[in-house]
Structures are given as structure tokens and as C-alpha cells.
Image (tube, rainbow, N blue to C red):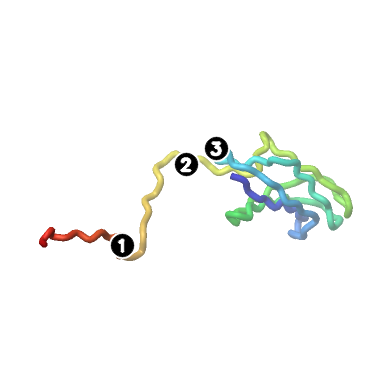
Amino acid sequence: MRAKIVVRILDEAGALLGWAPLLAEARGDRALRAIQKCVVPIEQSGTPSVVSYHWTDMNVQKRVPYAAGPVTEGQTVELTFADGIVLSMPSDDGPLPPVTVRGAVAVAVPSAAMGVVGSGGG
């Protein structure tokens, strides 16, 4: 499965300094791994303090402190990831919760799917 991650570099006040889309893939090990380099073009000069990784399909965001020097408009910043992992989900080895509903569920069988059984009389 492939996922789109939006990478944002922010300053201490939360102002956007630069952003870039990043493609990642899931391999069934609770992690999203980058499948391309992450190069973020800087659109506004400032001092970065946070990098935000936003998994757009799930609307999940992870913010990571970023202690780099000041950046200037037009510069690019390349971000690297340990083992290529951009986001990882915590492991919960317990059982999955049961599926619940808040009310009765009516299941209707379409009449076209029902067979007609005769008594065999003639």
C-alpha cells in the first residue's frame, strides 16, 4: 500500500517555512517507509523548530523537534529517516476489540436472490 505524506518544516510559532509531498509504502510491519528522497524547498526564511509529517489518507500527524540552523528562501533541506521509516504505529499485542453497533441491524435478502420451492403438486 502506498501513502502520501505531507512534510512541513515549521518555526517555533508554527509558521510554515517549507513543505513537500513524500510517497511512502507499508510493508505489513506497522511502519510507513519513504520510497523517495525527501527534499523540502524553503519558501520563507526563518529558524525551523518542528517537522510535521501528515499522513493525509488517515489524517494523522506526527511532529518531531528539528534543531537546525536558520534557513533561507530558495534553499532546500533534505530529511533522512532511520531505516527509511517516516511513521510507525505502536505495537499492541493484545486482542482486537469486538465490533459493536449502537442499535439493531436489519439484514434484508433481496427477493430476486430467493428461490421458489414448490410442493410438487400437479
Mark number for residue 29?
A: 3
Left of 51 or right of it: where is 31? left
Q: Which residue is mark 2?
A: 92
Task: State the count of labels.
Answer: 3
Residue 87 sits in quarter: top right
State the residue at coordinates (62%, 42%).
25
Specify which label sits upstream in the sequence, 1 or 2.
2
**Residues marked 2 and 3 touching at CB (< 8 Å):** no
Q: Which residue is mark 1?
A: 109
What is the CA distance from the residue labelled 2 to the residue labelled 3? 12 Å
Specify which label sits upstream in the sequence, 2 or 3.
3
Q: Residue furthest front?
A: 122
Does residue 118 appear in the picture of this structure? Answer: yes
Number of residues whose C-alpha sits closer than 10 Å to that of mark 1, classed few (under 14), some (14–19) or many (20 or more):
few
Q: Amino acid at mark 2?
A: Asp
Depth order, front residue of 111/46: 111
State the residue at coordinates (84%, 47%).
76
Residue 96, how many percent across, how many down? Answer: 41, 46
On-image quarter of the C terminus: bottom left
Q: Amino acid at mark 3?
A: Asp
Left of 118 or right of it: where is 75? right
Which label sits in the foreground, 3 or 1? 1
Q: Amino acid at mark 1?
A: Val
Does residue 107 appear in the picture of this structure? Answer: no
Which label sits in the foreground, 1 or 2? 1
State the residue at coordinates (36%, 60%).
101
